[in-house]
Image: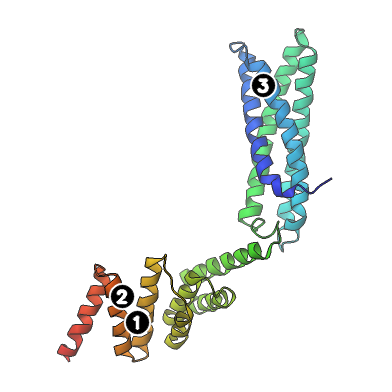
């Protein structure tokens, strides 16, 4: 059988929607006020059963890669166990619906409909718990980007996201040196990403007090034509680094170039005004 793990997120969303609709229509049919509710419930519930069976198989295929992630095995097993419970309940719902169709018009059909409604509700609660655990696999244990496909570009995005977010957390916790180290790694691994380069330069300048290192990173950057805010930030940090190195005329030249492109920026105008006033106060 082909590996269908890639399609698991798609299939499971269909399964949840079909099951929810099937259970809702089945409970509506028990009131006797909606003639179409019974046939709709049977159709939707049977479709949900098929979708859940496919979702269970695709989940098994997807688990293989995720289970290899350190620390994820227990979460994978919990998700798998609830997936199996959901599958079993869904099969029971499907069987009850088929029996209700087979005994249509007989007194036992209504009892089967009641049973399907009860088991269907249990299946819906089970699929919600399964989905919650699946979400934890993706968002807590990183069982998503790069893990399933194994594509180098996907794995690289996962690495970049991890480095960047961990650096943000380190900064908030006051571990600025650690944050700068992580961003420096990111800058080395992703030299073509201007956002990473500018952020790494900022960390070197502000957290490590290394203006020369920051200037080196900023100098390696090529043009950034479509990101005016990033261009401004790059120029501002370049001027900061040059100022810190005692190269005020060069810093002033950078700021003047920024003023040509961003003439209405009040922060820039204020900085230039202070620079103009400082020789007079001395």
Image quadrant in which the N terminus is located = top right
**Residue 258, labelled with which disc?**
2
Q: Is residue 50 above or below residue 211?
A: above
For the point 58% across and 11% down, which residue is it? 33
**Residue 239, labelled with which disc?**
1
Image marks 1 and 2: residues in contact by CB distance under 8 Å:
yes
Q: Is residue 121 above or below residue 70?
A: above
* Distance between the alpha carbons at the discs numbered 1 and 3: 68 Å
Q: Earlier in the sequence, mark 2 or mark 3?
A: 3
Residue 129 lies left or right of residue 198; in this view the side is: right
Q: Earlier in the sequence, mark 1 or mark 2?
A: 1
For the point 43% across and 77% down, which residue is it? 202
Q: Which residue is mark 3?
A: 41
For the point 39% across and 71% down, which residue is it? 231
| Camera-nearest label, 1 or 2 | 2
Q: Answer whether residue 269 is visible to the viewer in this image.
A: yes
* Way the structure is coloured: rainbow
Q: Is residue 230 above or below residue 244?
A: above
- Give percent across and percent down for residue 71: 71, 61
């Amino acid at each position: 059988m082909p590996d269908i793990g890639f399609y698991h997120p798609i299939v499971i969303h269909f399964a949840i929607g079909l099951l929810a609709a099937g259970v809702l229509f089945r409970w509506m049919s028990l009131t006797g006020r909606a003639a179409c509710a019974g046939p709709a419930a049977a159709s939707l519930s049977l479709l949900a059963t098929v979708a859940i069976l496919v979702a269970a198989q695709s989940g098994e295929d997807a688990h293989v890669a995720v289970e290899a992630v350190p620390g994820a095995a227990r979460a994978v097993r919990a998700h798998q166990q609830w997936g199996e419970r959901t599958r079993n309940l869904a099969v029971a719902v499907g069987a009850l619906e088929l029996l209700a169709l087979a005994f249509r018009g007989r007194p036992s059909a209504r009892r089967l409909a009641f049973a399907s409604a009860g088991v269907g509700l249990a299946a819906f609660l089970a699929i919600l718990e399964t989905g919650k655990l699946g979400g934890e696999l993706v968002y807590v244990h990183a069982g998503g980007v790069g893990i399933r496909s194994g594509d180098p570009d996907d794995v690289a995005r996962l690495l970049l996201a991890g480095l960047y977010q961990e650096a943000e957390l380190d900064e908030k916790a006051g571990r600025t040196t650690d944050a700068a180290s992580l961003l420096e790694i990111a800058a080395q691994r992703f030299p073509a990403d201007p956002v990473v380069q500018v952020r790494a330069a900022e960390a070197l300048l502000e957290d490590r007090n290394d203006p020369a290192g920051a200037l080196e990173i900023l100098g390696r950057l090529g043009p950034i034509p479509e990101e005016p805010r990033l261009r401004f930030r790059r120029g501002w940090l370049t001027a900061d680094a040059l100022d810190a190195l005692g190269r005020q005329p060069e810093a002033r030249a950078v700021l003047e170039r920024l003023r040509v492109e961003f003439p209405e920026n009040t922060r820039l105008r204020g900085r230039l005004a202070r620079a103009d006033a400082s020789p007079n106060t001395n």
